Image: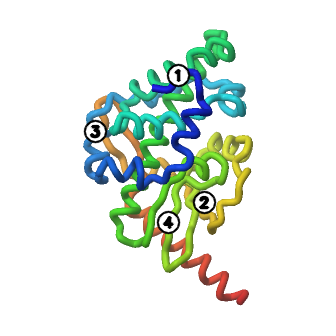
Amino acid sequence: MIKDNYQKMYDTIEKLSSWQYIDTLKLTVRDIERFCQNLELDVERKASNEKIEIQSQIPIMATHFYYYLYEYKHIPTQKEFISFYIRANEKWIRKNVPTNELKTALLGRLSRTYPSLLRDIHFYHVLKESGEFTNVLYNLRYDLFGKVDIFVQRQGIAYGLQLRTKTANSNKYYIKKPNRNAIPAKSVLLDLPIDLSQAKSIKTKKNWLKLYDVRKVQETIALIQQHQKKVMSVS
C-alpha cells in the first residue's frame, strides 16, 4: 500500500487502461450486482462542507478506488474504501482536516462518492456486455482531467461519456470542480446524467443502490445517432 504519497499512487494508475486492471478481474455485470446485494451500504444524507466538496488539493477519491482494484484485485466494500483512503492519507488529513466538522464532511463525501464509483464500474461492464461498441475503455487521467468517465467506440468514432446524477448539487459541483477539462478528450463528449428516480435499483443489505442499465446503453446509442445526423447536416 502506498501511504502519504498521492502522486505516486496516481502515477501508478494513470498510464494504464482499464483493460490492464479492470478487465483482468474478469467481472461480469451479474458479479457486480451480486456484490452490491451483499453490501452494507450507507447512503444516508451526510454533512457536507464547501471546502471538502470542491477544493482542488484533496487527494482524489477515484484514484484510490481504482488503485485499490489494481493492488488488491477486487472491488472494495464501502468500509474498505473509506478505511483505505484514510490510511493512505493520514498526514494530509492531520494537516488539512483539523476539525471534527471537516472530518465528518470528509467521511460524508467518501460515503457519497463510493456509490457513484460503483455505478461507473457497473456501467462500464454493462456497455461491454451490450455488444454495441467496438471498444469500451476507462482511463483515470481522462476521468480526472478530460471530463470523460468512460470511452466507447462505435463505427470507428470515439465517444467520451460524462456520467453523473441528475441533481442540483451534481450540476453545481460538475461546473465548479477545478480542472474538469484541463486536457482535450480527443473524442465526442456525450453528457449522460442519470435520474435516480428512474434508475435500476439494487437492494443492498442496508439501502438501495441506483445503477445505470441497458436503457442507458440505448440512450447512448441515440445520442451517438443524433451527433451523426448533425455532422451529416453540416457536411
Q: Nearer the viewer, residue 167 or 41?
A: 41
**From what the image shows, is residue 175 above or below residue 208?**
below
Q: Nearer the viewer, residue 12 or 195?
A: 12
For marks 1 and 3 on the same chain, the one whose residue lies earlier in the sequence:
1
Residue 3 got which mark?
1
For marks 2 and 1 on the same chain, the one whose residue lies earlier in the sequence:
1
Which element carries disc 2, helix, strand or loop?
strand
Identity, as a three-letter code, of the amino acid under mark 3: Gln
Separation of marks 3 and 4 at Cα, in angstroms: 28 Å
**From what the image shows, is residue 105 above or below residue 10?**
above
Separation of marks 3 and 2 at Cα, in angstroms: 28 Å
Q: Position of residue 139 (x, y in %)?
A: 53, 52
Identity, as a three-letter code, of the amino acid under mark 2: Asp
Q: Which residue sits at x=60%, y=34%?
A: 60
For marks 3 and 4 on the same chain, the one whose residue lies earlier in the sequence:
3
Which element carries disc 4, helix, strand or loop?
strand
Marks 2 and 4: in contact by CB < 8 Å? Answer: no
Separation of marks 4 and 1 at Cα, in angstroms: 33 Å
Separation of marks 4 and 2 at Cα, in angstroms: 13 Å
For marks 4 and 1 on the same chain, the one whose residue lies earlier in the sequence:
1
For marks 4 and 2 on the same chain, the one whose residue lies earlier in the sequence:
4
**Badge 4 is on which residue?**
152
Residue 37 got which mark?
3
Which element carries disc 3, helix, strand or loop?
helix
Q: Position of residue 164 (x, y in %)?
A: 56, 49
Q: Position of residue 95 (x, y in %)?
A: 68, 13
**Badge 2 is on which residue?**
191
Q: Disc 2 or disc 1, which is closer to the eye?
A: 1
| Left or right of 32 in this view: 111 | right
Q: Disc 4 or disc 1, which is closer to the eye?
A: 1
